[in-house]
Image: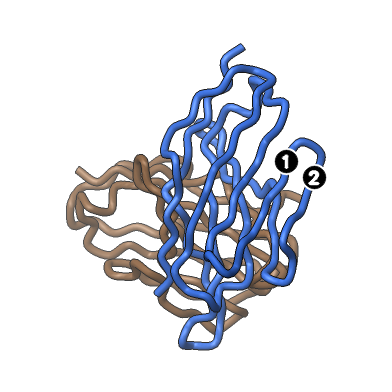
Amino acid sequence: GENVEQHPSTLSVQEGDSAVIKCTYSDSASNYFPWYKQELGKRPQLIIDIRSNVGEKKDQRIAVTLNKTAKHFSLHITETQPEDSAVYFCAASLRSGAGSYQLTFGKGTKLSVIP
Amino acid sequence: NAGVTQTPKFRILKIGQSMTLQCTQDMNHNYMYWYRQDPGMGLKLIYYSVGAGITDKGEVPNGYNVSRSTTEDFPLRLELAAPSQTSVYFCASSYSQTYEQYFGPGTRLTVT
């Protein structure tokens, strides 16, 4: 099955600095890579996603890059703000033996933005 | 639209008891999922459904059962609860399996 490794597990940055979270996946057939943000006690919510036919995607202060050869993808947050503090999860979608797709999640990165 | 709703929000079970976690979505999504989230861990897929009448196992299905009689509802059944099932359970739905998954608010379950 798919295995997703996420680093670092915790990250502290000063407000205004950039934050980078990295994930690696094991199966080269994975084709969809979403990132979810989970605030304390809340549900996960999608912040950005990328598909295997695209190398980079940007949405305001958030960007995701994908390197299919190396099997890793990264989340970049620029000009961080205190409200960016949360746990961020990466995931990879892989087609299962039954012909459907399943998401495998990383263990999460707790981002703290220090005012 | 209410999106994805789950009941109950919290529950304490004794070892060996059974219960059903309810999940309903009003977005007419064919795809629905159940995940569990343990402290410091990511989400692990328990079961999923690609449409009414069709369910399949995920990564951690042991101790759970599901059914999907309608597009809207996807209940998760715990039989003979064990302490290892103490977790936060999230239901989710999506238009397609490689599109955004919308999560419910979660159910915090404690088995003692």
Label disc, if present, on residue A59 of the rendered structure:
2
Which amino acid type corresponds to the residue marked 2 in the rendered image?
Asp
Q: Which residue sits at x=59%, y=50%? A: A74
Colour assignment, chain A: blue
Q: Secondary structure at mark 1?
A: strand
Q: Which residue sits at x=65%, y=55%? A: B102
Q: Which residue sits at x=42%, y=55%? A: A5
**Residue B38 falls left or right of residue A73:** left
When the figure is inspected, residue B95 is found, relative to residue B81, above or below; the finding is: below
When the figure is inspected, residue A36 is found, relative to residue A27, above or below; the finding is: above
Q: Residue furthest bottom?
A: A98
Q: Residues within 10 Å of mark 1 (few under 14, many from 20)?
A: some
Q: Chain of mark 2?
A: A
**Residue A64 falls left or right of residue B74:** right
Quadrant in the picture for the C terminus of chain B: top left
Q: Residue furthest right?
A: A60
Which amino acid type corresponds to the residue marked 1 in the rendered image?
Ile
Question: For residue B52, which quarter of the picture?
Answer: bottom right
Spatial distance from mark 2 to mark 1, Cα to Cα?
Answer: 5 Å
User: Which of these two is toward me, A107 or A75?
Assistant: A75
Q: Residue furthest top?
A: A115
Q: Which residue is mark 1?
A: A62
User: Which of these two is toward me, A12 or B29?
Assistant: A12
User: Which of these two is toward me, A34 or B10?
Assistant: A34
Indicate the position of residue B82 as horizontal and vertical percent values.
20, 55
Asked if marks 2 and 1 touch (Cβ < 8 Å), the reply is yes
Indicate the position of residue A20 as horizontal and vertical percent values.
58, 39
Label disc, if present, on residue A71 of the rendered structure:
none
Q: Secondary structure at mark 2?
A: strand
Colour assignment, chain B: brown
Indicate the position of residue B54 as horizontal and vertical percent values.
54, 83
Q: Chain of mark 1?
A: A
